[in-house]
Image (cartoon, rainbow, N blue to C red):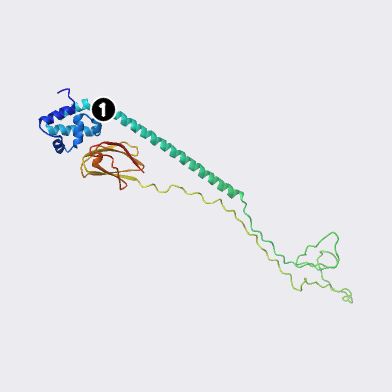
């Protein structure tokens, strides 16, 4: 019996003791399909190697066999299969890491482009503010000076005479000279009467011109900068697993290292992720799966192994 596989060895000992697969399953609390797969050498239907070794030890203990001898037989029988599985798992993890790295690079490129666009908008806004001149408010001075008296003679080559200062008045002796008063000689007061100062047209004093300030125009900027389109982060994904039968599970969160667990009936576990889960169920019909409170599946009947189940937003 040294060259027998671990499955044939277990089956012969079980039949010799008169036990059925269901009886062994009741004693070991291992699903009968897993026990049949172990006896048939169908390791593809068994869970990951760490769980399969636990099944082998429990099976050997229930039959009263040496656990170390059973483990040696299992390694000889299933070593090649699990080595290939390890290579496939490493390749899958490497592919996931490459994909995650590419996604990170794309995010960096998008962020750089957003920063460049924001800088261009800031530059255009600053240039627009510098080019548009700020117009000053101009208030014309009000004219309160009296018009000069009309002499009745036109001065050639001129269209008008500037109004003299209020403290000066024109005299008959010269244009623009200051007026000085002397006592008139005796008997000459009537021969040269002083000219009367004419009143402005309309018989009323000249009114000052009211100034009208120019409407100031201020250049408005191009507009407010666009607000950042990213809001609060999205709510994380929540994965809930509840076992109705014994089952091993493997959960990979956002491309990180896989987490393995053995769930017994009634046990419940939760994981959270940002983007997605990669799920493997050793007993597809024995586990209830919920993503953010929504039931998922079904992924297969009891005893069936469901691999690489992708759950994401």
- Location of residue 268 by image quarter: top left
Q: Using a 10 Å C-alpha cutoff, classify the residue at mark 1 as few (fewer than 14 neighbours), some (14 to 19) or many (20 or more).
A: some
Q: Residue at x 29, y 27 (%)?
A: 84
Q: Nearer the viewer, residue 107 or 167?
A: 107
* Residue 65, x across and y down, in percent: 13, 30
Label 1, secondary structure: give it. helix
Relative height, residue 234 to residue 187 (above, below): above
Q: Nearer the viewer, residue 122 or 231?
A: 231
Relative to 44, 108 lies left or right: right
Relative to 60, 119 lies left or right: right
Q: Residue furthest top?
A: 3
Q: Residue at x 31, y 30 (%)?
A: 88
* Residue 186, x across and y down, in percent: 88, 76
Relative height, residue 51 to residue 236 (above, below): above
**Residue at numbered disc 1:** 81
- Location of residue 240 by image quarter: top left
* Residue 71, x across and y down, in percent: 18, 28
* Residue 152, x across and y down, in percent: 85, 68
Q: Residue at x 51, y 43 (%)?
A: 117
């Amino acid at each position: 019996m040294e060259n027998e596989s671990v499955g044939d060895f277990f089956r012969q000992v079980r039949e010799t003791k008169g036990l059925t697969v269901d009886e062994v399953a009741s004693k070991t609390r291992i699903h009968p399909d897993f026990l049949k797969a172990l006896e048939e050498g169908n390791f593809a239907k068994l869970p990951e190697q760490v769980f399969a070794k636990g099944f082998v030890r429990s099976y050997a203990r229930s039959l009263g066999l040496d656990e170390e001898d059973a483990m040696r037989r299992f390694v000889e029988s299933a070593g090649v299969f699990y080595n290939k599985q390890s290579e496939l798992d490493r390749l899958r993890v490497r592919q996931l890491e490459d994909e995650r790295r590419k996604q990170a690079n794309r995010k960096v490129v998008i962020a750089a482009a957003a920063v460049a666009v924001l800088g261009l908008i800031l530059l255009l806004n600053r240039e627009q503010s510098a080019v548009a001149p700020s117009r000053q408010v101009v208030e014309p001075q009000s004219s309160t000076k009296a018009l000069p008296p009309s002499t009745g003679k036109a001065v050639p080559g001129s269209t008008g005479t500037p109004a003299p200062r209020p403290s000066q008045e024109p005299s008959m002796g010269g244009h623009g000279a200051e007026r000085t008063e002397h006592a008139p000689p005796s008997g000459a007061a009537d021969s040269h009467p002083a000219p009367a100062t004419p009143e402005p047209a309309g018989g009323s004093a000249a009114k000052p011109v009211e100034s009208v300030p120019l409407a100031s125009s201020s250049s408005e900027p191009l507009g407010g900068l666009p607000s950042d389109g990213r809001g609060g982060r999205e709510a994380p994904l929540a994965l809930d697993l509840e076992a109705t039968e014994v089952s091993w599970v493997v959960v990979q969160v956002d491309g990180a290292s896989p987490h393995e667990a053995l769930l017994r009936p009634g046990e419940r576990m939760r994981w959270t992720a940002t983007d997605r889960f990669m799920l493997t169920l050793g007993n597809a019909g024995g586990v209830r799966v919920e993503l953010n409170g929504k039931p998922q599946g079904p992924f297969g009947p009891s005893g069936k192994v469901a691999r690489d189940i992708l759950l994401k937003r």
